[in-house]
Amino acid sequence: MSTRLPPGPSTPALVQTLRYWNDPEDYVRRCRAEYGTRFTVRVWPFGTIVFLADRDDVKALVRADPAVFQAGKANSFGDVVLGRRSVFVTDDAEHARSRALMMPAFHGKAVRDQVGLMREITAANLAEWPVGEPVRALPAMQAISLEVISRNVMGIDDVVLKERVQRSVLRLLYSGSWFDALPGQVRFARHPARLRRKRMRASTDALLGEQIAAHRRDPRLDERTDVLSMLLRADVEDGPMSDEEIHDQLVTLLLAGHETTATGLAWCLERLVRHPEVLARARAAADSGDDTYLDAVVKEALRSRPVVPEIGRKLSRDAEFAGYRMPAGTNLWPSIDLLHRSAQSFPEPEGFRPERFLEKGAVADWVPFGIGNRRCLGATFAQVESRVVLRELLRRFEFETTDAPGEAAVRRHVTLVPDQAATVVVRRLRGAA
Ligand code: HEM
């Protein structure tokens, strides 16, 4: 058992930090090329990070004890916005309990029941798309996914209230600063960035509070299928969920549930207009109701342009992993980006070939939604929504193809978005709409 960590750059931590933040994906790929599928870097504000890009290491992490390999601790940067009770930042029993309470709303049948609504919302949002002019697909997809998730999570029908909640969520999401990444920033109670965040969270909470009260008054609460109603009805051993906890889970679902899906859809369009043959096949699939091919397009977009480039676990105590004795506090980051670029798992990894998902046994390292007991709660929801939106787009519009270079992937919060917001042009409307 080695007491050292896996190899990595020997340059000072400051140099590694500057190189990493200048272009995280480029730095991580260079390290992969130089040190192999397991390497250590030192980056402020995280500290020691061991990147993992080997399928067996990732499998071992799935089996590892979640009380030692903690995801909540690794995600603790999120508590400024999401709140300290959020399923994203908690560990152990508290995490398991909130996850179990919300899970039923995101299972296959519950998600299939949402398809009609997803289609309706998409159709209304696409009605105004211009012909012959560039459209920035990312914000357009975001409008759709925010509406879909807010209907699913909160079941809001009131148009004015719905818009107020959506505006508030967007403000909360886009008001971040470098301060958010500072470890232990909760200690800087009077820092202007923290105070601004707190004000925004308070105004979102006030709106959510109105909604919670309205649900509690609703005589049909027992019949409602939205997540909020499920959380209000939940009768758990240690009493009902507190309002604080409900607020934190709602904000988490509203934020985690819309930006990611919208980004995946934007990448789908960005890739399709650069691959005319795939676009033609996808259009035919949309017309004939061939969901399998559309699902493969969504999967290949998430493979070749992962929305979330890596996931995190943090050691709560010294532990053995992959033949190393790692000290408490070490971060382990399986790199989705590197796993998806492995030529061994995905021949011609730079290509865009949905067919690989129709072939047998090709997807061992496909992990866009993370792994194990922390795998994305909304994975099925996101894939079904993406298929529904993509089908509507392809049935309504004929897109211009392009041989322009692909858009670059740039960081926005924890996601990698296309730098031109996936700009596409509708050549003409199709009869199918
Ligand atoms: C294409 C869309 C999406 C992508 C790529 C994505 C990706 C991810 C990833 C990588 C994680 C971390 C998993 C890990 O640490 O192993 C995660 C967690 C999570 N996601 Fe998603 N997500 C998407 C859509 C959604 C949607 C639609 C929802 C809500 C309906 C959602 C809710 C969550 C929640 C609550 C967690 C925390 C789970 C936990 O810690 O137990 N996500 N997601």
Image (cartoon, rainbow, N blue to C red):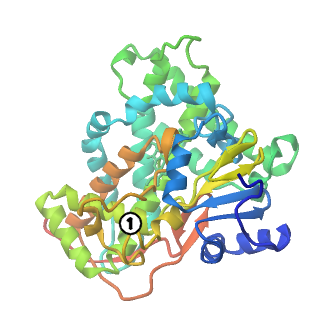
Residue at image coords 19%, 72%:
281
Q: Nearer the viewer, residue 28 or 209?
A: 28
> Residue 371 in the image: x percent, y percent?
49, 47
One can see residue 266 in this view? no
Q: Is residue 364 left or right of residue 199?
A: left
Helix, strand or loop under label 1: helix
Residue 381 position by quadrant = top left
> Residue 291 in the image: x percent, y percent?
20, 56
Residue at image coords 65%, 40%:
70
Residue 412 position by quadrant = bottom right
Residue at image coords 56%, 31%:
208
Disc 1 under 8 Å from ligand 1? The reply is: no
Residue that numbered label 1 is attached to = 301
> Which quarter shows the C terminus?
bottom left
The type of residue carrying mark 1 is Ala
> Residue 40 in the image: x percent, y percent?
71, 63
Q: Nearer the viewer, residue 3 or 24?
A: 3
Q: Is residue 342 left or right of residue 327?
A: left
Q: Is residue 40 left or right of residue 281?
A: right
